[in-house]
Image (tube, rainbow, N blue to C red):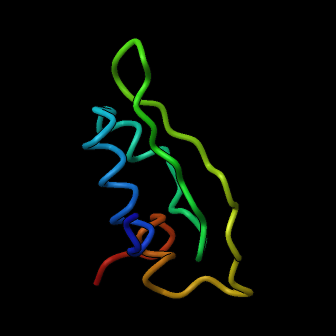
Amino acid sequence: MIVSHGVTIRGFRMQWMHYPWEWFERERNPQNCSAQLIEGRAAGGYSDRLVFQGFGMAKPSQQERREEGQVGHA
């Protein structure tokens, strides 16, 4: 089990699952307390799926908006 911020989990999934950089750019950060399951497959490789959506925030923080490309950098 790994507990971390959304962008870190997204980066971990990209590396572990060998997803391309374009996947990382398209994929949104998971919500707070969401759970993602990564399982090995009998035929080899891995699969991943969202098992709990998590809890959304009433208003995204400036950091979250920046990570989603909604805030320009100074």
The residue sitting at the right extreme is: 58
Q: Residue 20, percent across and down?
A: 30, 32
* Quadrant occupied by the C terminus: bottom left
Q: Residue 33, percent across and down?
A: 59, 75
Residue at left offset 42%, top offset 18%: 42
* Quadrant occupied by the N terminus: bottom left
Residue at left offset 38%, top offset 46%: 24
Indicate the quadrant where residue 63 lies. Answer: bottom left
Q: As rendered, which of 47 and 30 lies closer to the eye?
A: 47
Q: Could you tell whether 63 is left or right of 50 in the image?
A: left
Residue at left offset 50%, top offset 62%: 29
The residue sitting at the top extreme is: 43
Residue at left offset 48%, top offset 86%: 62
Q: Residue 31, percent across and down?
A: 60, 69
Indicate the quadrant where residue 6 lies. Answer: bottom left
Q: As rendered, which of 66 and 5 lies closer to the eye?
A: 5
Q: Residue 14, percent across and down?
A: 32, 43
64 up-or-down from 46: above or below: below
